[in-house]
Image: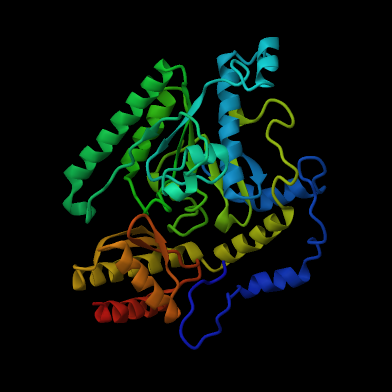
């Protein structure tokens, strides 16, 4: 939870929370890095209960650690494929033909299954993840890919309260397309084993959809026998005001798989019991994460609880969103489409050149902001970001916009 918000005349270094500094100097568990899949530390299960399993999403009691977001999603895809094929063969052992043909990349051992993803999505840069990524051409150019279905993600109009009917129609259109694609790919002989989606499309432009959209999408996955994978690599960790962004949907049964990384310090994915691999080494690599990061995460979680940081995020996020609305009203020729949950906020500019100019001027004044989509500025402050930080941010941004020509 290092602060990425720096003001003028302050040291240009990352500010680490004192609790984490004390923990680092008092902890002697960072001497080596064990190969977790073969020789995990004796206390590793206990440390998982103290860290990752203490914040497990609703309905999930299993977690598979990994090193990063891409390998988390890649192995989550594999888990969904393994689950789907085991289900198809009635949980019997694979045939001799399947065993032989998988060694030469042929069916039935390597089945023609698919993952349905959404335009604007970003799930990583490994081969399977890249096939489900559709945010920027530079990520995908020259890389072979799979014939997997791609559904439209809703393009909502803002402010939401003024476009209730239009946005409901847009979400219904996208859901209808999802069902059509699932049927079409089944007819093509490439059935959809899983659906993967971000609660908020971050890299693709901070694109939102309603809880009703996600609830209906979850039902479509269940209806067609597809696993439902919620990618919380960017949204997990508390920046939306809840530890998991999908908690805003209000579902008791939100997903079959939830992947994470970034703010969780380690990568991995939670999953339901039925998606547990049936044999050793099917989900495996040398490191399978890093136990030292789980120790850090335990201390981060202690700080979040002790300092009520999720409540802080909700307060700061409300102030940030209101401030961005005010700037949008003041500079309508530059800014539009203010949106966000918690401090996970964004605003569009009139074009990419304007966005880049604003961001450069802000950085020179000590304010770091991110870009995404075609012309969006995204805000990703730390959990310790307070309301007075919001006012500093808005003052800097206002000064820049007032000078913008």
**Looking at the rendering, which quadrant does residue 224 occupy?**
top left
Question: Residue 360: image x %, image y %?
Answer: 40, 74
Question: Residue 4: image x %, image y %?
Answer: 51, 71
172 or 144, which is in the foreground? 144
Query: Which residue is pictured at 68% across the width and 55% down the height?
Result: 294
**Residue 297 horizontal side relative to residue 12, left or right:** right
Query: Which residue is pictured at 36% across the width and 68% down the height?
Result: 356
Identify the image quadrant of the C terminus. bottom left
388 or 281, which is in the foreground? 281
Q: Can residue 44 be seen here?
A: yes
Q: How many marks?
A: 0
Question: Residue 317: image x %, image y %?
Answer: 38, 65
Query: Which residue is pictured at 20% across the width and 53% down the height?
Result: 161
Query: Which residue is pictured at 27% across the width and 39% down the height?
Result: 171
**Residue 6 horizontal side relative to residue 158, left or right:** right
Give the residue at the far front of this rendering.
142
């Amino acid at each position: 939870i290092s602060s990425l918000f720096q003001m003028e005349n302050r040291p240009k270094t990352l500010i680490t929370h004192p609790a984490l500094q004390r923990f680092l100097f008092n902890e002697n568990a960072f001497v080596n890095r064990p190969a977790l899949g073969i020789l995990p530390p004796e206390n590793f299960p206990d440390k998982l209960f103290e860290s990752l399993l203490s914040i497990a999403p609703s309905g999930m009691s299993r977690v598979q650690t990994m090193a990063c977001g891409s390998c988390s999603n890649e192995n989550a895809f594999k888990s969904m494929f393994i689950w789907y094929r085991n289900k198809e063969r009635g949980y019997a052992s694979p045939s001799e033909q399947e065993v032989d043909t998988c060694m030469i990349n042929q069916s039935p051992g390597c089945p023609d299954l698919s993952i349905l993803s959404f335009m604007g999505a970003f799930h990583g840069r490994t081969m399977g993840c890249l096939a489900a990524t559709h945010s920027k051409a530079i990520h995908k150019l020259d890389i072979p890919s799979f014939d997997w279905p791609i559904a439209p993600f809703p393009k909502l109009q803002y402010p939401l309260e003024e476009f209730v009917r239009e946005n409901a129609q847009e979400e219904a259109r996208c859901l209808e397309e999802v069902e059509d694609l699932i049927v079409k790919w089944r007819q093509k002989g490439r059935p959809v084993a899983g659906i993967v989606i971000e609660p908020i499309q971050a890299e693709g432009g901070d694109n939102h959809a309603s809880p009703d959209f996600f609830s209906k999408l979850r039902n479509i996955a269940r209806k067609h026998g597809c696993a439902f994978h919620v990618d919380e690599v960017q949204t997990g960790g508390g920046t939306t005001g809840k530890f998991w962004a999908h908690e805003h949907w209000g579902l008791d049964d939100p997903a079959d798989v939830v992947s994470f990384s970034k703010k969780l310090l380690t990568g991995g994915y939670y999953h339901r019991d039925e998606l547990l691999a049936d044999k050793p080494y099917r989900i495996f690599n040398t490191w399978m994460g890093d136990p030292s990061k789980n120790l850090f995460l335990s201390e981060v979680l202690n700080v979040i609880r002790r300092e009520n940081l999720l409540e802080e995020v909700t307060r700061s996020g409300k102030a940030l969103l209101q401030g961005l609305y005010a700037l949008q009203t003041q500079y309508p020729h530059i800014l539009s489409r203010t949106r966000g949950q918690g401090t996970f906020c964004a605003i569009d500019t009139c074009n990419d050149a304007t966005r880049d100019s604003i961001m450069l001027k802000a950085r020179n004044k000590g304010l770091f902001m991110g870009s995404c989509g075609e012309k969006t500025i995204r805000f990703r402050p730390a959990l310790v970001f307070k309301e007075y930080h919001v006012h500093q941010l808005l003052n800097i941004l206002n000064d820049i916009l007032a000078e913008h020509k």
